[in-house]
Amino acid sequence: MKLIIAIVSDEDSGILADNLSQNGYSTTKLCSSGGFLKSGNTTFLVATDDDKVENAVSIISDTCKSRRRLLAPEKLSGSFGAFNMAMPIEVDVGGATVFILNIEQFLKL
């Protein structure tokens, strides 16, 4: 068995939960926040059989696309310490960070 930990944008979390559920995956959702942009994220925990990992990762990849956003300078304050900007900056947001771990034992009590 494997444990998939997927950290995704809050913007993608609802549809990802639906897509995983429709394909037979049980998930646990945790609220989290990103460090760089301090934006809302959702962390999904998915325990699944080894042969279903590739399909789950494919669902995550297809659902959670990265996109470009213009951010106002005040959204970045503190991210760069005393860095000061007058113009908005374009950054990549979204996508997913995925970790896949071996599960030694899985109990559902």
Image (cartoon, grey):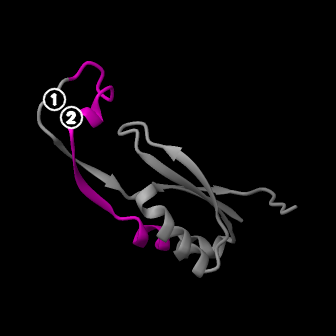
Residue 27 is left or right of residue 34, and the answer is right
Q: Residue at x 68, y 57 (%)?
A: 102
Query: CA gap, disc 1 to disc 2?
Result: 6 Å
Residue 74 is left or right of residue 44, and the answer is left
Q: Residue at x 72, y 65 (%)?
A: 1
Please report whichever mark, 1 or 2, sits nearer to the chain's N-terminal start: 2
The one of 34 and 58 positioned closer to us in this rendering: 34
For residue 85, which numbered disc appears in the image?
1
Say if the magenta span includes residue 59: yes
The magenta-colored residue range is 58-83
From this viewpoint, which residue is outermost toward the top?
82
Report helix, strand or loop for mark 1: loop
How many marks on residues?
2
The one of 92 and 78 positioned closer to us in this rendering: 78
Which image quadrant is residue 51 in? bottom right
Q: Is residue 97 visible?
A: no
Residue 81 is left or right of residue 41, and the answer is left
Could you tell me the amino acid type at mark 1?
Answer: Met
Label pair 1/2, CB-CB below 8 angstroms: yes
Q: Position of residue 109 (x, y in %)?
A: 88, 61
Please rate how many residues cluster around mark 1, counting C-alpha atoms within 10 Å: few if below 14, some from 14 to 19, many from 20. Answer: few
Could you tell me the amino acid type at mark 2?
Answer: Pro
Q: Residue at x 48, y 71 (%)?
A: 15
The residue where tag 2 is placed is: 73
